[in-house]
Image: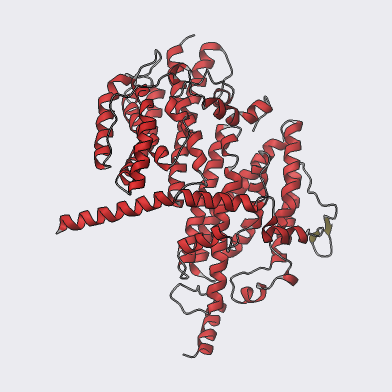
Amino acid sequence: MSVIDLEKAFQDKIDAEIKIEPKDWMPEAYRKTNLRQISQHAHSEIVGMLPEGNWISRAPSLKRKAILIAKVQDEAGHGLYLYSAAETLGTSRDQMVEDLNSGKAKYSSIFNYPTLTWADMGAVGWLVDGAAILNQVMLCRTSYGPYARAMVRICKEESFHQRQGFESLLVLSKGTQAQRDMCQDAINRWWWPSLMMFGPKDSESTNSDQSIKWKIKRKTNDELRQQFVDMIVEQVKLLGMTLPDPNLKWNEERKHYDFGEINWEEFWNVVKGNGPCNKQRLAARNKAHDEGAWVRAAALAYAEKRKNRLKTKAA
Amino acid sequence: MKNENLINGVLHIADTVLILGQRNAAWCAHGPILEQDIAITNITLDLIGQARNFYQYAALLINEADNKNETEDTLAFLRTERDFKNLLICELPNGDWAQTILRQFFFSSFQQLMYQEMIKSSDNQIAAIAAKSIKETNYHVKWSSEWVIRLGDGTDESNQRMKNAIEYLWQYTGEFFIAAEYEIIDVAALKNDWLEKVKSIFDEATLSIPENTFMQTGGKTGVHTEHLGFILPEMQSLQRNFPGAEW
């Protein structure tokens, strides 16, 4: 078959909602886009462990400590599934980790913001995981099979995280004045970065059209962002808190909430590495990796010795 | 106080597993291999879960005896350095992966023997918590034993790091077997089985047990190393800063 025929057959499959599997023919750009997206997603899970891991030692009750540990551990597990899914596209996990640690690969910018108070654990669960879920629910139907299947598992755990985050803020919202202030402050700080998680506006986004045609994505950045705003505006009322946007208003004509302009200068600055924690996050990943080098070497050496001993025995 | 020894015995175990959990938790998101990050975090979760069960039982006993209103959280977050009865080995810094692994192996192997005895307790609560916990501990022993062997018999560097860890940690293992007045089981009786277990794993790991080491003690009576005075203020900060708040 000629490349043109292959491409047509590929697109027909996608149009017929048949999943693309690792050994199927695929356009190089489809492979690259998926690899970039899945590995970035994996990196985000791993780097995302850091801002929340930051509060494990100080969780205010044993129950909250256990919930937080379990949550961060889930993220490590998500990273594992996603690295495995990405490996089916022909790049090793070692290579992906190296790209993350060298700063070549990107991860979600949201994790370059600091977690300053306990309320940030709730806000991250509710807003950050809430924003991530909208994207991830869509990705459960993405056209690349291994990615879609990983997302189905991940979504189950993520929706649990979001509920935990909201519940933890609900307790604060019913608590003392100091706790309510802490809760509002966390919402104020996390709201705009959460909106940024959906990426540039559709009019500025370079990958969007092709990704939609290939059904890697099924909704645009702006559509998902709007869905998020509409959802959170209702939920924040249950907390008796507010969102820090004076332009937030129901638009009867659109049947959606209008909202203010994102600070795109801040968005691009954080993407470029100038967020409050970009350097710390990468430094922490590199430190863990470098200090673990001797452990990985020992595990390999031992496995090799064992294999040889078994061989000798067998002979 | 009624049941004073039992209460202290339960608190001793609760404090021990909590403080070890608190230490291990520092590996979460910082482990040497993603799969092992998940494994040590799993162990941490088990330890925190065990701590909760023991604290809840201690709270029940205290409230019965003294008409108080203790909870798992008041016991974990509002007691001070001299009240804590954890084993010293649990509060020591994590050090490198070798030190963390070896501590887990020493402790879990001891804990496994301890729970085997506690299962037979005539106190139903103690027996039930031990029965639930030992399933977890069996895995902790297996996991940490495998790592002791892997590192001991891995590279020259990993072998040396294990030797360093043994030299540092061995002096804190004697405390396992020196009974406090409140001890729930006869800990001294566990010593031989524990030594045998350690020896068999060390043999496979090409490591050896040090001789004639002076053994440090004090944890069981609240006389700790200088480390605990840093662990508690961090762990307890929110409860201390916002007295009486619900979380």
State the scheme by which the image is colored. Answer: secondary structure
Q: Quadrant of the C terminus of chain A?
A: bottom left
Classify A68 as above or below A218. above
Q: Number of marks in the image?
A: 0
Q: Position of residue A89 (x, y in %)?
A: 48, 70
Q: Nearer the viewer, residue B161 or B172?
A: B161
Q: Quadrant of residue A309?
A: bottom left
Q: Residue at x 43, y 13 (%)?
A: B5
Classify A288 as above or below B232. below
Q: Residue at x 46, y 52 (%)?
A: B34
Q: Position of residue A308 (x, y in %)?
A: 23, 57
Q: Residue at x 72, y 34 (%)?
A: A179
Q: Quadrant of residue A136?
A: bottom right
Left or right position of A251 against A226 = right
Q: Nearer the viewer, residue A49 or B163?
A: B163
Say if residue B131 shows up in the picture: no
Left or right position of A141 against B129 = right
Q: Residue at x 73, y 30 (%)?
A: A176
Q: Position of residue A88 (x, y in %)?
A: 45, 68
Q: Position of residue A34 (x, y in %)?
A: 55, 70
Say if residue A5 shows up in the picture: yes
Q: Given the current orientation, which residue lies at the most extreme top position? A: B1
